Image: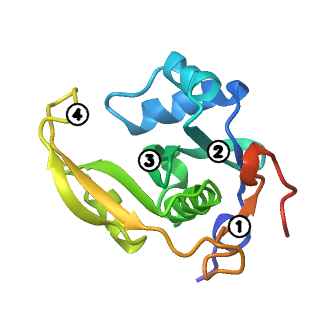
Amino acid sequence: MAKNKLETEFSPVFRRMTVEDIDQICIIEEESFSSPWTAAAFYNEIVNNHFAQYVVMEWEGQVIGYGGMWTIIDEAHITNIAIRPQFRGKRLGERLLLELQTLACFYGAVKMTLEVRVSNKIAQRLYEKMGFSAAGFRKAYYSDNQEDAIIMWADLPDCSPGGPSSGLSGGNSGIGPGGGRKRAGR
């Protein structure tokens, strides 16, 4: 069976989220979450929160996914991660999470945490595949329906120069340490 172009030639570009991306990000939020973040919340994260690191995944000039985290001392806390519905099921969430893990390493994180709905088994399987394990619960964490969250943690691989995770990024990354942008490798 022949694979389509997306499956065989798909090479997304990762770059820092900008204020100009917020409208597209809000569309993905609406498509993905029952309690989406507002444009003002993303603006605040990008402009005012010096702990926040947000990444977009682009393909053919369209933002198809994004992820965000806070990096504080040696920990990274994922705040959001989402892929547009028509691009799901293609292992892009895995690639985006790997990009966030790599970026977290650049910022000195050795551990990463997140919360996930107890009902979101697909996301839980992804996180487990990427080294996360359940560490606890947050009762009634989600305001839309009072659903509990599972708290998950992962140890990040050795991020030192030349360490096992050097070059972990699975896509064409436009993100470099120190907040700058680097040229996408091919």
Front-most of residues 10 and 114: 114
What label sits on residue 56 in the rendered view?
2
Residue 25 placement (x, y as % from top left): 57, 32
Mark 4 lies on a secondary structure that is loop
Q: Which residue is mark 3?
A: 78
Mark 1 lies on a secondary structure that is helix
Q: Residue furthest top?
A: 40
Q: Mark 2 and mark 4: span between their CA atoms?
A: 24 Å
Q: Amino acid at mark 3?
A: Ile
Q: Residue furthest front?
A: 73
34 shown above or below 160? above
Mark 2 or mark 4: whose residue is earlier in sequence: 2
What label sits on residue 5 in the rendered view?
1
Q: Residue at x 49, y 45 (%)?
A: 72
105 shown above or below 177? below
Q: Which residue is mark 4?
A: 142
Tell me the crowding category of disc 1: few under 14, some 14 to 19, or many 20 or more residues within 10 angstroms, Cα based.
Answer: few
Mark 3 or mark 1: whose residue is earlier in sequence: 1
Given this view, does label 2 or label 1 mark the residue nearer the observer? 2
Q: Mark 2 and mark 3: span between their CA atoms?
A: 14 Å
